Image (cartoon, grey):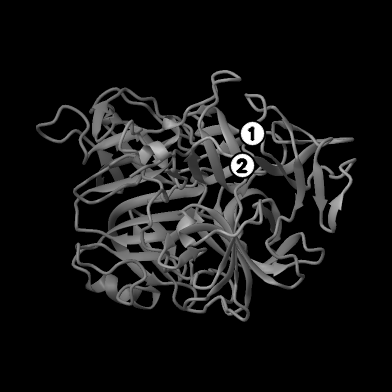
Amino acid sequence: MRRIAFVLAASLASAFWLASCGGGGGSGAPETMPDNSNGPSSATLSASSGEITAFGSVFVNGHEFSTQGAQIVDNDTGDAVADASALEVGMSVDVKPMAATALDAASPRAAEIRLHPLARGYVDATDTTASTLTVMGQTVQLTSATNFSDRRACVTATTSPCTAVVGLSDLGATTSPTGPGSYVTVHGFLFSASGTGANIVATLVSVGDAPGPSQAAFKAEGAVVTTGTTSVTIGGLNVDLSHATCWGAGGTMSCTSAFSAGQVVSVFSATAPALPATNFTASVAALRSRLPVQTVGATVELQGRVSSASGTGFVLRGVNIDGAALAAANLPTVGDDVRVTGTVATGGAGITASAIKLLHAAISRSLAVEGDFTAVAAGSSANTYVVTVLGQSINVNASTRLSDRSTWMAPRSGSQAFNITSFQTVLAASASKHLVVSAAADTTGQLTAVALRIVPASSGAAVQGVVDVTPAPVNGSSAASPSSFSIHGLAVSADPATFASPRGWRLHAQATTVAAGDLVVARGSWTGGQLVVAVPGGASGPTLSNFVVDLGTPRTGDPCDF
């Protein structure tokens, strides 16, 4: 599996991948869980804005849209795409379904699919530590869910073939004005409008040959940070508009003071800027809407990572979301990857949310555990339950992704055999009581399962999460004086000899100092109300069944799942 985030094979025996982050390439099965965790799902959908997650027809935001008869359009050039084969997993698209398509329709037909990349140009810099790259002055954040594709001719050439780019470390960066880096098209969603931090969170980085003649060969899109008489700054790119054709909502307009700070603008040219790209002479500049539909009252969907949150309001894909109608426990925090359904608010610039689906929680409030469940009780409302694993009480509801993988023949996620209505019955009848649960904590610390999986029976137990401040971690020196710390109140006692650093598929002993706030993965046995990590007989150090890996301070808001 290709992953930008750090990947750890925790235990092959139990198929336990706590440190493996969700997403990534491929065209696997689409989501089959309910689309909305808080609100109705029968509204008529005007547009769905998100990334392509799978094919069959095309899957966007959990819906399968039939592409038969759909118009596929490049939003930058207006050119029609010949057929759906040009679409890729990870592309950011706006889908407008045929009229009168309800959100709960089995397979709506797409009337129009608009491709909407946010940057085209040469890679000027890469940072493997921060998982970022710089393209056209835009800082692009890569996550565990970022896909890569390589469409260069040399990849499939019979003579002088080249190795395909499959991750950040394979990209070339600009070495001089005449030594451009890899040419890429970046799909994703806008994140920061401040000019600092990541401007774009990437869902797909598509590598290509140097472009031929095209008015959109080089592009940047983002929120305007500063303005001049005939210039704007987008991210770290100073854009000269003095020779451009400028477009607004009503058509062409003068480029003099055409745009204001905070507006989303696309700038294009067929000519590459001097590298590294800090200054760009645009031939075309266009005002963009943050929403795929601006009709007040229209029902739309957006999916992405929350960039800011305050009270009941938050910002998603640069769009202000009013979450006053959502349950307080469902309000997201910064870094959460969510899908929001709502109606276009007055003014056409925001959304009044009616439903929200948590896809991945920010790592700061994530907890993943593996172990036998010791109790299952009915929750406070119909089709909700509370399951106890490693002493943690975890809510399960209709939005939890459920799967039974206790045997290789077990039903897949979303099957009729294991869903929320059969939850308690299936658990009671299962030969294995062993679960892997990914959960998110709300502001009170209450855990709600994002995903729950029945796995083959095992005597092992594990946890992944952020080390608590209280009680303060104690770093030991030997088996007789173990290290001790807690993760969401779950106590861990570990022989320092089990501390490890993973290299590929192997674990290597490594002395580590655990600190509060570190992201830690630990595996051992659940004994006496704590997770005990000890060197097993016959071993001299960490094994796949007994180890502690300290991943250090997690990147802010990097959503992880397994």
Residue lying at 82% horizontally and 36% vertically, measured from the top left? 243
Question: CB under 8 Å between callouts 1 and 2?
Answer: yes
Residue lying at 28% horizontally and 41% vertically, measured from the top left? 9
Report the side of 258 relative to 160 (left or right).
right
* Secondary element type, mark 2: strand
Amino acid type for the residue under numbered disc 1: Met
**Foreground of the two, 491 or 453:** 453
**Sequence-first tag of 1 and 2:** 2
Residue that protrudes farthest toward the left in the picture: 538
Residue 446: tell me if it is visible.
no
**Foreground of the two, 155 or 358:** 155
Up-down: is 328 above or below 506? Answer: below
Report the side of 69 relative to 345 (left or right).
left
Mark identifier at residue 136: 1
Residue 221 spot, x, y in % from top left: 68, 44
Residue 144 spot, x, y in % from top left: 44, 44
* Residue annotated with mark 2: 119
Up-down: is 62 above or below 311? Answer: below
Amino acid type for the residue under numbered disc 2: Ala
Residue that protrudes farthest toward the top in the picture: 176
